[in-house]
Image: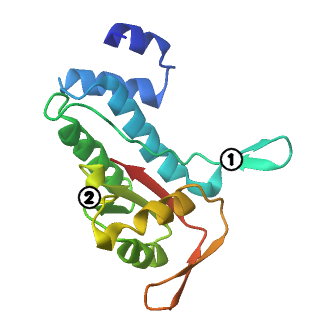
């Protein structure tokens, strides 16, 4: 899909203004990546304050995670996402950058339950290193949660309580 075709389907409003600003800056990151990252940031700003109720039972919240995949060096993904994440920080979004362990994220989420995790590469967060293996079961639990209290156990046998965590990831 070309940029012109893509812009034709973007509704008027903040998202279209973001896309036009991005195009004027002549950034190399694909416009689709800009939209996904921007929507993740806006969802983070809204948090649990807005939702849609489905079938009178389930609630859908605006939490959006973005996994941006491209060949190394081709799309200048990290340069573009760093720019958008910096804008998010200026807007008051709490951002955790770089490498993380399950225990590190638990500590961070206790202090700030509404958190955006940003990493240039997904391998900084999820990989096969022994100290990060617990992330593969922990991340889905926190990413797919509804606003409720979570209780997690630490490696040392302690208990951590997270009050309605809302984690967003941009990789």
Q: Is mark 2 in CB contact (under 8 Å) with mark 1?
A: no
Rendered location of residue 152, percent (x, y): 55, 78
Question: Which numbered marker is on residue 51?
Answer: 1
Using the image, determine if residue 29 lies above or below residue 136. Answer: above
Q: Residues within 10 Å of mark 2 (few under 14, many from 20)?
A: some
Q: Residues within 10 Å of mark 1 (few under 14, many from 20)?
A: some
Rendered location of residue 155, percent (x, y): 43, 85
State which quadrant residue 156 falls in.
Answer: bottom left
Q: How is the image coloured?
A: rainbow
Using the image, determine if residue 3 lies above or below residue 138. Answer: above
Q: Helix, strand, or loop for circle 1?
A: loop
State which quadrant residue 32 falls in.
Answer: top left
Q: Helix, strand, or loop for circle 2?
A: helix
Residue name at image x 30 percent, y 51 percent: 122
Front-most of 166 and 139?
139
Q: Is residue 59 left or right of residue 82?
A: right
Residue name at image x 65 percent, y 49 percent: 50
Q: Nearer the viewer, mark 2 or mark 1?
A: 2
Residue name at image x 32 percent, y 47 percent: 171
Residue name at image x 31 percent, y 73 percent: 131
Using the image, determine if residue 3 lies above or below residue 90. Answer: above
Rendered location of residue 153, percent (x, y): 53, 83
Question: Which numbered marker is on residue 124?
Answer: 2
Front-most of 99 and 4?
99
State which quadrant residue 38 falls in.
Answer: top left
Question: Earlier along the polypeptide chain: callout 2 or callout 1?
Answer: 1
Rendered location of residue 101, percent (x, y): 34, 71
In the orientation shown, which residue stands out farthest toward the right? 56
């Amino acid at each position: 899909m070309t940029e012109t075709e893509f812009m034709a389907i973007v509704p008027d409003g903040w998202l279209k203004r973001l896309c036009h600003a991005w195009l004027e800056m002549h950034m190399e990151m694909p416009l689709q990546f800009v939209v996904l990252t921007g929507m993740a940031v806006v969802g983070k700003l809204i948090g649990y304050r807005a939702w849609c109720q489905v079938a009178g039972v389930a609630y859908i919240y605006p939490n959006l995670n973005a996994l941006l995949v491209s060949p190394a060096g081709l799309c200048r993904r990290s340069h573009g996402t760093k720019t958008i994440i910096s804008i998010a920080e200026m807007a008051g979004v709490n951002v955790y950058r770089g490498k993380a362990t399950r225990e590190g994220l638990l500590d961070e989420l206790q202090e700030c339950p509404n958190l955006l995790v940003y990493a240039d590469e997904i391998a900084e967060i999820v990989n096969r290193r022994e100290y990060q293996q617990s992330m593969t079961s922990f991340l889905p639990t926190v990413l797919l949660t509804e606003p409720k209290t979570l209780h997690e156990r630490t490696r040392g046998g302690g208990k951590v309580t997270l009050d309605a965590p809302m984690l967003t990831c941009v990789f």
